[in-house]
Amino acid sequence: MTGAPVPAYKQRMTDRDSAPPAAAFDPHALPPLREVIARFGLDARKALGQNFLLDLNLTGRIARSAGDMAGVTVVEVGPGPGGLTRALLATNARAVIAVERDHRFVEALQDVLAASAGRLSIVEADALTVDPVEIAPARGPSWRTCPTTSRPRCCSAGWRGSRSMSA
């Protein structure tokens, strides 16, 4: 193997293969999303296509729409302040991998990370540059897609095997 540099997202990854079974996660035990947004001075940047889902009822509905998540590893692209992340952790998903390229949100997700009992991993990278096999190697029955609120504008070769459905 050559001495090629290791991408930064691979350096920050943890061993998700030894993740504990899904534990109870209460999204209401965390500070409200509006409070997180204010504390970190966050704003949605249209250039990055950012929108905030603040209604826990709505994010819960989106997460549940994927069906039974038992034993599933979920990859969430662009978690922002963590509204859908919280809802996904409240399901019985084995693990949630949040891929976020905006460092402001990586910092804001730290409370969710601490409360996740090892079920949340945060990958700070552009999802189009991340190799999905590297971050979630088991793409068989444990790979699940959720309906999204918008269609992706482009897609890298590594993600073409995944499906995206509009809500």
Image (cartoon, rainbow, N blue to C red):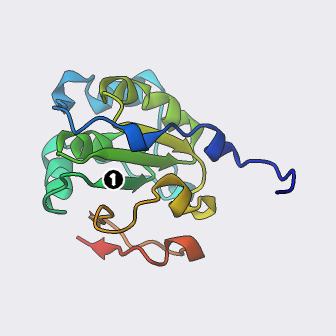
Q: Quadrant of the C terminus?
A: bottom left
In the foreground, 45 or 79: 79
Q: Is residue 80 left or right of residue 124?
A: left
At which x and y percent is residue 95? 32, 44
The correct choice, above or below, for 41 with respect to 49 in the image is: above
Return the residue at label 1.
73
In the foreground, 131 or 156: 131
At a point 39% along the width and 66% down the height, the residue shown is 139
The correct choice, above or below, for 109 with respect to 131 in the image is: above
At a point 27% along the width and 22% down the height, the residue shown is 31
In the foreground, 16 or 12: 16
Is residue 81 in view from this perspective?
no
Q: Quadrant of the N terminus?
A: bottom right
Q: Is residue 87 left or right of residue 127?
A: left
The correct choice, above or below, for 43 with respect to 162 in the image is: above
Q: Residue furthest right?
A: 3
